[in-house]
Image (cartoon, rainbow, N blue to C red):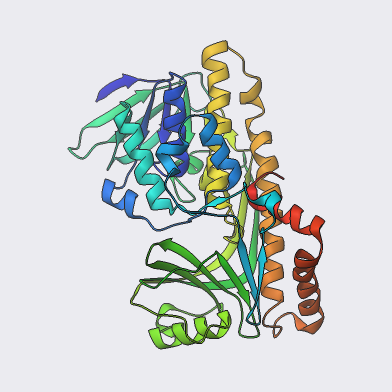
Amino acid sequence: MARESTSVVVVGAGPAGLTVGNLLRRCGISCVVLERQPPARVMGRQRAGVVEYRAVRMFEEWGLADRLIGDAPSDEILEIRVDGNSRLLGQDEGNASRRMILCPQQVFVRRSIEVFLAEGGDLRFEVADVALDGLDTGRPAVTYRDGAGVRHEIDCEFIAGCDGDHGISRASVPAGVLSVYAYDHGIAWLSVLADAPPPQHPLLAVSPYGFAGHFARGPQTSRFYLQCGLTDQVPDWPDERVWQQVRARLGAADLPTGPITDREVFRLRSVVYDPMAYGRLLLLGDAAHIIAPLGGKGMNLALHDAEVFVRAIRGVVRDGDHTALQSYSRDCLRRVWNYQEFSRWLTETLHDAGDDSQVGPFRRQLARARLDRLSNSPSAAQAFADLLAGLA
């Protein structure tokens, strides 16, 4: 077995893990990033596409904004379309600087990898049989097998568990340590990736046909989301039905179509694990929390966790100060629950305001009153904008 030592082992090379790696290098703290997938798979995974203003400002402070997201398109406007009638939020000059960066996750990940490797970072792909040991000791260890079958053991001070909802990191925490807060929204979506022109602005639509979303994923690529039945499967949604429902729900009979390259049906769910740490293992991103997609907060929570983690580790390694480390979970969970509430509020509002067959006309009218308030109340619109920007 090959044995080595570093300050931090990062398990997982998604947005959280790569951000941890890049920020640690700026602190002069050694780390090794482990990823079980090959590079092409990691850089090609289609996921979220919005970097909130708070995260942009964070990367600016660390000197990384230009290299990670600098030339990605931005937008300060969100369109909400009700029965085909458009309402544009965020047009006022006070919000103009709080732009959403429309950077697909695969682009962000690719750039993060390029920066990390260009600066001498240690990133190891296609690792197998990862195991975490000694988490409740002062020097935990991570073992794995590389592509050639050689076993490795890395002795470290801390482990960043960034390997998602089904990774080894959270599974390594002993039973009974974590409290689990889970919620099934009772809603399913069909996600469609198509070679079709993107919208002018990020678009959320409600109508009697149900919820729909339309987002840019490139100059000539769109991601559509359609509310669907809880028991629906992909074969239930052939191309003809997809485009008929997209046009009906968006109120755009002449919407251009294109080849559909990917589609998936999934249920909306939210999960929070508390605490987000056990011994020398700290959980980040999807390993610690899953959030429903509305509001675009999943990747942004991962980026926030990463910065809180790095600042905590820097305090220990540089100054021997454990204060931020001890408050890591509490500091992260404060934002996690705030974003969970916002995402749930937006999910309930946009789905209740459309098809009332499940919620009834009373709740439908309540939801539409909330949407009206966003258009007619400056204070409500400002609060909404602050939450979208990550400033609330």
In the rendered view of the protein, which quadrant contains the C terminus? top right
* Image coords of residue 153 (percent x, y): 32, 26
* Image coords of residue 23 (percent x, y): 47, 29
On the picture, is 301 further left or further right than 362?
Answer: left
**Extreme residue in the top direction:** 319
Asked whether the viewer can see residue 38, the reply is no
Q: Quadrant of residue 156?
A: top left
Q: Quadrant of residue 205?
A: bottom right
- Say which residue appears at 31% left-offset and 47% top-offset: 37
- Say which residue appears at 77% left-offset and 83% top-offset: 360
- Say which residue appears at 41% left-offset and 24% top-offset: 25
Q: Is residue 50 above or below residue 133?
A: below
Q: Is residue 148 above or below residue 358?
A: above
Q: Quadrant of residue 88?
A: bottom right
**Extreme residue in the left direction:** 148
On the picture, is 358 further left or further right than 56?
Answer: right
Question: Closer to the camera, 87 or 174?
Answer: 87
* Image coords of residue 120 (percent x, y): 30, 26
Question: Closer to the camera, 169 or 317?
Answer: 317
Question: Closer to the camera, 218 or 30?
Answer: 218
On the picture, is 101 further left or further right than 366?
Answer: left
Asked whether the viewer can see residue 18, the reply is yes
